[in-house]
Image (cartoon, grey):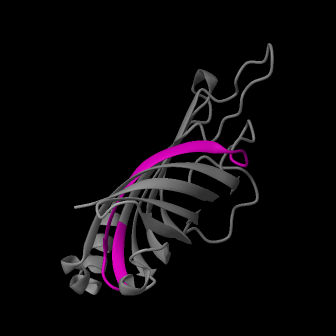
Amino acid sequence: MRLVGPLVVGLALFARPAFAADKQIRPLIALSFAGSTTYVDLEKGVGERHGIIGVQGAVLGNIVGIEVDVARASGLFQTEPGLGESPLVLHSNVVTATGSVVIAAPRRLTEYTLRPYFVAGAGAMRVSVDHPFGVLPIRDTVGVYNLGGGVIGFLTTRVGVAWDVRRFSTLKGAPPPTAVTTGGRLAFWRASMALVIRY
């Protein structure tokens, strides 16, 4: 998590004029898909779809803004066991915390329609996995980037909805040849829908 603080401060300085503009809180629900990893993934669960919950805080100017995103994916390394099968993974969680720059269509041109945006940033990812009998536990914090885009539409002057798709991937170099419990690679796509509240 040490990467997030300096990153957010830097983004805030970069986008300082945006702080007089549109401030938003966005609780979100999402699905992960098309994931891959070099961590120990006994149930091959990372490539499956998993639910994610999170929250974003954003400040958008006419075009440029900043965003902080914190989200948690429970069970990312798990699948539903078959009848009579014992799970190979007891618990698993992946938490991401990122700060991003947002480039959006000009507000004055999209006030009464959907406003598309592009987002790119970086931060930290915490990976936790517990296997039976304490074998091969994973407790790893690594750098992560996110890249994607979406649209925002407002139902009233204060409340709206946002949809976006973005990719999260660790900042590691070339993956090791075999599965690991620390220092591995993890990447997945996230499709989300958020309630947008202006304040």
Q: Nearer the viewer, residue 193 or 184?
A: 193
Q: Nearer the viewer, residue 99 or 119?
A: 119
> Is residue 91 shown left or right of residue 16?
right
Quarter of the image with the N terminus is bottom left
| Residue at image point 48% right, 75% down | 119
Q: Nearer the viewer, residue 67 or 185?
A: 67
Q: Position of residue 139 (x, y in %)?
A: 49, 43
| Residue at image point 71% right, 50% down | 179
| Residue at image point 68% right, 47% down | 46
Q: Position of residue 33 (x, y in %)?
A: 68, 53
- Residue 135 versus residue 117 in the image, above or below: above
Q: Position of residue 185 (x, y in %)?
A: 63, 59
The image quarter containing residue 68 is bottom left
In magenta segment, residue 55 = yes
Asked if one can make out residue 101 in the rendered structure from this viewpoint, the answer is yes
- Residue 107 versus residue 51 in the image, above or below: below
Q: Position of residue 132 (x, y in %)?
A: 62, 23
The image quarter containing residue 38 is bottom right
> Is residue 170 shown left or right of residue 22?
right
Main SS category, magenta section: strand
In magenta segment, residue 184 = no
Quarter of the image with the C terminus is bottom left
Start and end of the magenta stretch? 46-67
- Residue 89 versus residue 143 in the image, above or below: above
